Amino acid sequence: MTLAEKDRVADDCVMVICGAAGDLTRRLLLPSLCNLGAAGLLSDKFTVVGFAHKDFTTESFRDYFIEDVKEFVKDEKAKKYGFELAQRTAYLSGEFNDPAVYQKLKELLESLATEKGTSRNCIFYLATPPRFFCEIVENLGLAELTTEQAGQWRRVIIEKPFGHDLASAKKLNQDISKFLKEDQIYRIDHYLGKETVQNIIAFRFANGIFEPIWNRRYIDHVQITVAESLGVETRGNYYETSGAARDMVPNHLMQLLSLTAMEPPISLSADAVRDEKSKLLRAIEIGSHEEILSRSVRGQYGAGFIDNKSVPAYRAEPSVDPHSMIETFVAMKLNIDNWRWAGVPFYVRTGKRMEERSTEIAIQFRSAPSILFKNTPTHLAPNQLILHVQPNEGITLNIGAKVPGPIVKLGEISMTMNYKDYFGASLGTGYETLLYDCMNGDGTLFQRADMVELGWELIQPMLDVWQALPARSFPNYAAGSWGPKESDDLLKRDGRKWRKG
């Protein structure tokens, strides 16, 4: 759903951004709020309160806010809204571990409500490193800032990574549940704000032509790719403790997979959709340690070329151990043990410094019988349906057709629909829909506690096996390629190959 298609102004609220001076706020949250405001989807009294350790006053934070609007907000109408919003912002300087600061925050919110007429509904956005999540939620709870009364609501948005492994994810869920009800927790995954991802549900269930063939009888296999041409850049410290598997698989890739493969929900309510996604994740086979080794591939990029420019190896990036064994690429073969998908492999991969930036879901259908064309100079290519998530959002359907001429010869036709051509270009960041939904209490596009833990349950055995058997061949793919040879072999053993671009 585009901003223009939203049907009402979001519920009035104040947004407290913990980590308001960081890059996430400047580059994504602020532009998203400006886009929502420019579209007329925020209330007239919507207010932002910045909370960070930097020593700003409200006045100096407003100046900082305005400079960020100038730099990061592209649309002129959104910029104008940003300048207006800046005059309604407030700021509180303090440390996240200081309980006294949360009493000041409580007083600030009360004074804004009594003096400026702002709403007592409040969103607390944790745009901070993960080590602060529990601390902030606990302090908010102890200060009674998460207490809902007299019809007001309080919600907390938590950024990924949600845990470092299964044990830490469970503990984080347990710790924050001491102070928040599940319907107050919004675990955000910005991939779910992208139009194509949201449209998977509409594409599957609003079109009678596709859902009848969305099963093992007609689909040969599915490929899900999240490829980035960028390296780790300035995120070396984070990546050295994370790696591609932890960073991408339990959240982004599992979200894309569950939306693609889940059963039809009984409604579009948040829990109805999330129930089906949860059921799907539970149906994925984990396999023995031997099966994990044969069905998973890890890689690390070496030096290479991107856009004809030389780029360094991962081990030469800033803040990276020169002997690092951290993976920057993961590929997996997953089997779903249910009635719809039994026997249909799902191949997923993600990597840094790939040949191009591309996130897509490719559904390959079973080949048509070739007997009719056995005496013609042609090769029957299987039909493919590709859902392009980024950078160019759209849908492509590859089909066979006769090439004009006196000889029967088949060629492939690609029918492509770009969202921007039909619905106009979107200036969004991917966060607009998520913020809007949180304001309206719609948790459909946010992860529930059980889904977070299921994502980690699926990859924890793989992480354990990899830890016990360190990789011996790193780096094993050149920057600017499509990953290590072992990734191609993973599909080649099944008589298949990766779709490349």
Image (cartoon, rainbow, N blue to C red):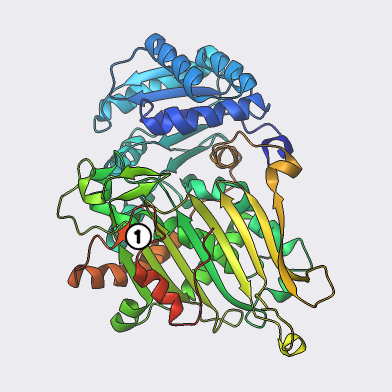
User: Residue 495: percent from the left, percent from the top?
Assistant: 50, 82
**Residue 453, relative to residue 197: is it above or below?**
below
- Which residue is at 61% across, 33% downward? 427
The answer to which of 193 and 398 lies nearer the viewer is 398
Q: Which residue is mark 1?
A: 329
Quick check: 90 left or right of 486? right
Is residue 310 positioned above or below 283 on the image? Answer: above
Q: Amino acid at mark 1?
A: Phe
In depth, the one of 71 and 122 nearer the eye is 71
- Asked whether residue 275 is in view, the answer is no
Q: Position of residue 171 (x, y in %)?
A: 30, 56
Looking at the image, the residue that sits furthest to the right is: 406
Where is the C terminus found, in terms of image quarters? bottom right
Q: Secondary structure at mark 1?
A: strand
* Residue positioned 71% across, 87% down in the render: 369
Q: Is residue 324 left or right of residue 391?
A: left
Identified at 30% across, 72% down, the residue is: 461
**Quadrant in which the N terminus is drawn:** top right
Q: Is residue 393 visible?
A: yes
Residue ID at (58%, 65%): 362
- Left or right: residue 12 compared with residue 149: right
Give the quadrant of residue 339. bottom right
Image height of 49 relative to 227, above or below: above
Q: Residue furthest top?
A: 59
Query: How many discs mark residues in the rendered view?
Result: 1
Quarter of the rendering containing residue 217 = bottom right
Q: Please tell me which residue lies in front, 245 or 138.
A: 245
Q: Residues within 10 Å of mark 1 (few under 14, many from 20)?
A: many
x, y percentage for residue 449? 43, 58
